[in-house]
Image (cartoon, coloured by chain):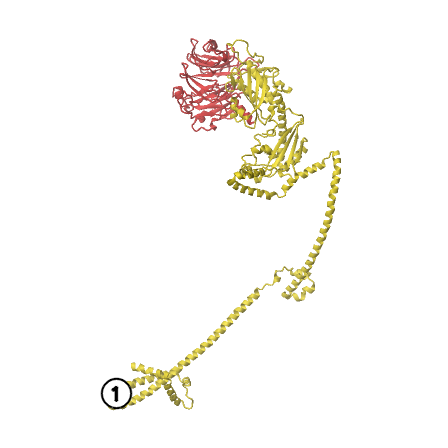
Amino acid sequence: MSSESSKKRKPKVIRSDGAPAEGKRNRSDTEQEGKYYSEEAEVDLRDPGRDYELYKYTCQELQRLMAEIQDLKSRGGKDAAVEIEDRRIQSCVHFMTLKKLNRLAHIRLKKGRDQTHEAKQKVDAYHLQLQNLLYEVMHLQKEITKCLEFKSKHEEIDLVSLEEFYKEAPPDISKAEVTMGDPHQQTLARLDWELEQRKRLAEKYRECLSNKEKILKEIEVKKEYLSSLQPRLNSIMQASLPVQEYLFMPFDQAHKQYETARHLPPPLYVLFVQTTAYGQACDKTLSVAIEGSVDEAKALFKPPEDSQDDESDSDAEEEQTTKRRRPTLGVQLDDKRKEMLKRHPLSVMLDLKCKDDSVLHLTFYYLMNLNIMTVKAKVTTATELITPISAGDLLSPDSVLSCLYPGDHGKKTPNPANQYQFDKVGILTLRDYVLDLGHPYLWVQKLGGLHFPKEQPQHTVIADHSLSASHMETTMKLLKTRVQSRLALHKQFASLEHGIVPVTSDCQYLFPAKVVSRLVKWVTIAHEDYTELHFTKDIVEAGLAGDTNLYYMALVERGTAKLQAAVVLNPGYSSIPPIFQLCLNWKGEKTNNNDDNIRAMESEVNVCYKELCGPQPSHQLLTNQLQRLCVLLDVYLETESHDDSVEGPKEFPQEKMCLRLFRGPSRMKPFKYNHPQGFFSHR
Amino acid sequence: MEVFQALQRLHMIIFSQNVSPCGKFLAAGNNYGQIAIFSLSAALSSEAKEESKKPMVTFQAHDGPVYSMVSTDRHLLSAGDGEVKAWLWAEILKKGCKELWRRQPPYRTSLEVPEINALLLVPKENSLILAGGDCQLHTMDLETGTFTRALWGHTDYIHCLALRERSPEVLSGGEDGAVRLWDLRTAKEVQTIEVYKHEECSRPHNGRWIGCLATDSDWMVCGGGPALTLWHLRSSTPTTIFPMRAPQKHVTFYQDLILSAGQGRCVNQWQLSGELKAQVPGSSPGLLSLSLNQQPAAPECKVGSARGSGDPGRPGCVDRSVTTLLPLGPDSRRQQLQGGCLYQSGLPSFLPVLLTSSNTPTSISGV
């Protein structure tokens, strides 16, 4: 087998040499007579299948010959050499055939390769072409979409509708016969029409502008004329004033007041309107006026909200800084306080005239930043009053209106929101500023239509006319009663200080004709002094001795007996009665603690005060009570049982007529006076 | 009129009081003619609130002050100016309670209607004795409601009455300074003691009136203008004079002690020998009556109560302990009944010391 394979390789080597191949070509040239020798061409003519058969047959022949040669050689005969020679020739022919076949095969292979290569190149070319075409298609498609997506500017223009266009546009633009079928032309035409219309409108606009200019100029001229008219009118008005005055028609004044009223803050405005209305409708004695600088009010009115906001902002900052550097900022804090407590520059003056020509002047202020109203009061009388020492507080602006309604002391701010504002600037209570600002009584807020519900925040506070109106009448009446009762007290105190208890004739029947005990002293005392008295403990403990009350000390004397009476005068006098506490110095000290009859005397004046009120409006109550006290002291002293062991006549002989001296388990004395019989009995 | 109401309260005086038959309620009458009913059991219970010390019911009983009250098994009898009225205990707690009946003793007409200062029940003959401003003792038959007899002899009005249980005799003390002993069988005066005439007890600067009186067998204690004195009735001699300067307005025997109250803030407990055993201070500056709750059925309501005069608004009361004489702790159950001006105290722990006997349920009410 190894020899076979080496034989097969041989032709290959030979072919690569080239030269031997030349020789073979020459041989095949001879076989192809008449034509130039070309094995390449020969290949085409031969059938590869038959070549394959030939190759097989040649190989078999070679194998057979080889085997015969080997056979002959192994036998080794003499004739064998010839036969071997013969057979060698035969095999050489076969080898030639094989060589030929080999060359053919090579040529075929090369040919096949070339063919394949050629075909491949063709395919490549086609492929490239295809790619190009596809790209072109894609590009075109892109272009198409781009075109499809193109938007013309004219689409944004709002065109008139189609019907309108054909109706209104002139035929040279609409060209109905052309455009009806062609939407493009139609749109173009419509755009033309739009342009035309816009041109016309622009023209119109220019016209209007010039027109306006003209009118402005006209107005200017007329204004000038009017302003020149004002001084002339003013002078006419001025000239007519004496006539108005002469005819008692204060139109001008009222008009001016209403003019000023427009600048009032809402609560004061409500107050002004309501009091004016009430004064005109119900009470002619009421007069209302506005005071203060209108200019300042106007200046305030200009930037209303902003300044306040700034205020609160800087307040907050202020607070922060003050925490750190309080001492150095003391002055600034002071300014803040002043700012917070600032009043509106305008105030409303209310003059309430009473029957006896005395006048109560009320000035209402509005604290802008606190949103509350305050009032200052002053009483003037027709005749000059000699002021008794003890009456000092009666008409003082600080106390004259205290407790007009029960519990309304006017010392605390009625607006719950204020407390927070105070905390910021370090004001403890409004009380310290009340003297300066006026009192923020609740009724004042109500007259101004300000209502402060306890639970709700400040912002619900609005000036309300109906609230003001509903409180107007009662408050005015209360004010009048208050002033009158204070004036009555004032007068009474003058005589009380001289030891005279003034009893009017219509109250005379309450007392016996002869009263021996005399009032010797009537002085005012301080609240603290009152609470320190040993016999007033009960009243203090019962909470009836608040510091808004006025306190007095009366001394009633008869002989050696001295009766001290500590009096609590409620600001609401005379609807709330004065309260008396007694201490008798006679044969030892007697108070309600150790003597039931002193107690009985107290209840005679304190509890049974109603019969002492006298004619309405019971201004005589206090004096009647004092007179009653004198009578009671008489009865007490005269009915005191005589001590048999003491020599001499009784100090106080019994002059009063009594049914019985003592009665009941507590041995009461007959304190009740019966008119007109004139005797004393037990209650 | 808040001020007026406060003043009215300040000047209220409780003249009389009475414990209900069941021992659980206390009626108190004041100078405005109102009767207020308090619940003792509620006010003295350990969980008593402020509210339970106020009257359960208050009603207008008389026009004038209610000077005296007693109660029978079923009725509360109250007396004021000239009239005695009866109320049913069973209905008294209902609103709008109306009196069962009212009677007026036969007075001779006068300018003034005489008051009734004292009521006394005589259980044996089922009658009621009334005494007061007309200086007479009127006996009323409770069965028929008629006035059967009148005893006269006093020269001034009568303050107080007391009954001697054994012999049917009644004692009366009056403004004229005399204590008179009446025999109910014969309707005659049997004995007169003019206390002020005895030098030992007379105190002329206080007057001669006898404000209170109580008896126990042959013994009688009386006080008022004259000093509080214990008398032996058979011999008509003062045996003990109690060293109390202030006039006494109410006195009563309690076992072997004498309780008295009057001008001053205290209820006093005396030994028969005249030794001051204890003083129980109250809030009222003067007391007009005391009453004992003897009802065993309600042991939790052993109470001392007293009326308030003097002290405005806050009626008087008996307050236990606190006195130096009583080695008791701080008062833990003192109660105040408001509105009716009554002050009350639960006394259970105080009784053993104060009254020596611990078993008997007792209460002191005073006006």
Above or below, A380 relative to A563: below
Determine the colour of chain B: red
Q: Nearer the viewer, residue B229 or A338?
A: A338
Dot 1 alpha-carbon crowd within 10 angstroms: few under 14, some 14 to 19, many 20 or more? some
Q: Position of residue B128 (x, y in %)?
A: 48, 16
Q: Nearer the viewer, residue B52 or A320?
A: A320
Please, which chain is the residue tagged with disc 1 on?
A: A
Q: Where on the picture, by quarter, is residue B349?
A: top left
Left or right of residue A432, residue B275 in this image: left
Q: Position of residue A270 (x, y in %)?
A: 63, 37
Q: Position of residue A370 (x, y in %)?
A: 58, 38
Q: Where on the picture, by quarter, is residue A674?
A: top right
Visible in this render: residue B89? no
- For the N terminus of chain B, the quadrant is top right
Q: Nearer the viewer, residue A321 or A443?
A: A321
Chain assigned yellow? A
Q: Position of residue A368 (x, y in %)?
A: 60, 38
Disc 1 is placed on an element classified as helix
Above or below, A224 relative to A267: below
Q: Total marks drawn?
A: 1
Visible in this render: residue B298? yes
Tell me which residue sits at (63%, 59%) in the image: A158
Q: Amino acid under label 1? A: Leu
In the picture as drawn, the residue positioned furthest to the front comes out as: A328
Disc 1 target residue: A72
